[in-house]
């Protein structure tokens, strides 16, 4: 297999290797809602002027409602995508030396911290929560295997870490489909707990580049100062304010995701691919012939996520509709004879 991309969404590279134009491909390599939420189009003046404080305040209030942040906690801080927040973490935690991350998981955390001179240790989730470190990172639900840690365990780890002066970072980028174990409502009362949430994954609008940081007010003030003025566009803030404050729209998005999840899972089940992980917006398959399956799907112009550290894993995003599900099923039905799992 050719060198694998570090992330999902490498459609241009796939086209270069296997031909076709992006429009010819079925891209299932990301964990993004394939059915974007419908929203009120921001009026013209929002596109023409810098975002003002009232617009930011509306988005923050809507995010607090959506994420279950109590009224007496600092409201979530909008950032230009959670990746931007990850990039700031080593500076935010300046003075730290050792970071432990529950692995395997999103590979940007080790990269960013190592680039800033930190020692990074990758451990199992159970060991990571018990670690003695300046910072611990947990992605919950985890990407790519969907592992979900109980809220009580995460809060207990934060309390233990606080005694040692450490910080717990919880990435909840995929929590919106079922936020039952979210600690977003707890972060404002603990000065050593930072929660990251993604707007684009759940609402299917990743191109807006919008995320939120939930933490103690002092932490958020520091991040705000680090970003400088107007870090998030006015249209992104307006769309967030429209969608996140509307419980009916949120419920509709959640139900649509569940429907797409059921149909995508059915396709994989019928193809005999063992599903070992489920993150709501993606499904993880384990198979000894994963490399061959990946290459076959690429030749069919279907892109999924392969992993350089686990050659037997493939992650499938959700199909957008019945037509895409049928196309995936057809591509899988054309697989040559491969070893059974």
Image (cartoon, helix red, strand yellow):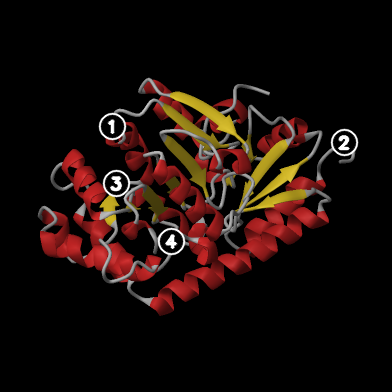
Q: In this view, does 252 lie to the left or right of 46?
A: right
Picture quadrant where residue 127 is located: top right
Residue ID for mark 2: 338
Nearer-the-camera pick, 73 or 203: 73
Q: Secondary structure beneath disc 3? A: loop
Q: Do the residues labelled 4 and 3 touch (CB within 8 Å)?
A: no
Horizontal and vertical percent position of residue 229: 13, 45
Q: In this view, does 192 lie to the left or right of 267?
A: left
Q: Secondary structure beneath disc 1? A: helix
Instruction: Tell me: residue 109, above or below residue 250.
Output: above
Nearer-the-camera pick, 146 or 11: 146
Q: Nearer the viewer, mark 1 or mark 2?
A: 1
Q: Which label sits on residue 281?
A: none
* Number of numbered discs on residues: 4
- Position of the C terminus by quadrant: top right
Horizontal and vertical percent position of residue 251: 48, 75
Q: Which of marks 1 and 3 is nearer the N terminus?
A: 3
Q: Which label sits on residue 203?
A: 4
Mark 1, Cα crowd under 10 Å, few <14 / some 14-19 / many 20+, is some
Q: Which label sits on residue 91?
A: 1
Spatial distance from mark 4 to mark 2, Cα to Cα? 37 Å
Q: Nearer the viewer, mark 4 or mark 3?
A: 3
Spatial distance from mark 1 to mark 4, Cα to Cα? 29 Å
């Amino acid at each position: 297999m050719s060198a694998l991309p570090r992330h999902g969404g490498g459609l241009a590279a796939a086209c270069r290797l296997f031909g076709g134009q992006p429009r010819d491909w079925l891209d299932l390599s990301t964990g993004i809602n394939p059915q974007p939420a419908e929203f009120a189009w921001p009026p013209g003046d929002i596109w023409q002027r810098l975002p003002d404080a009232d617009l930011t305040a509306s988005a923050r209030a809507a995010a607090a409602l959506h994420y279950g942040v109590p009224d007496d906690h600092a409201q979530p801080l909008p950032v230009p995508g959670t990746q931007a927040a990850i990039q700031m973490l080593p500076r935010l935690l300046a003075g730290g030396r050792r970071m432990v991350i529950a692995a395997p998981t999103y590979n940007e955390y080790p990269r960013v911290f190592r680039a800033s001179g930190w020692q990074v240790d990758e451990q199992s989730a159970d060991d990571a929560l018990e670690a003695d470190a300046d910072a611990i990172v947990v992605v919950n639900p985890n990407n790519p295997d969907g592992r979900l840690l109980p809220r009580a365990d995460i809060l207990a780890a934060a309390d233990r870490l606080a005694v040692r002066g450490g910080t717990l970072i919880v990435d909840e980028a995929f929590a919106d489909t079922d936020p039952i174990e979210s600690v977003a409502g707890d972060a404002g009362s603990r000065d050593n707990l930072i929660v990251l949430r993604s707007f684009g994954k759940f609402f299917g609008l990743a191109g807006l580049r919008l995320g939120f940081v939930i933490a103690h007010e002092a932490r958020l003030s520091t991040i705000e100062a680090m970003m400088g003025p107007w870090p998030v566009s006015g249209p992104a803030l307006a769309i967030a304010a429209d969608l996140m404050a509307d419980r009916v729209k949120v419920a509709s998005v959640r139900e649509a995701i569940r429907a797409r999840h059921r149909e995508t899972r059915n396709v994989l089940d019928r193809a005999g691919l063992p599903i070992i992980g489920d993150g709501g917006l993606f499904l993880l398959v384990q198979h000894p012939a994963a490399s061959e399956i990946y290459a076959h799907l690429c030749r069919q112009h279907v892109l999924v996520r392969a992993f350089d550290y686990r050659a037997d894993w493939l992650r499938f995003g959700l199909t957008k509709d019945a037509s895409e599900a049928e196309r995936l099923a057809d591509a899988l039905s054309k697989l040559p004879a491969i070893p059974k799992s």
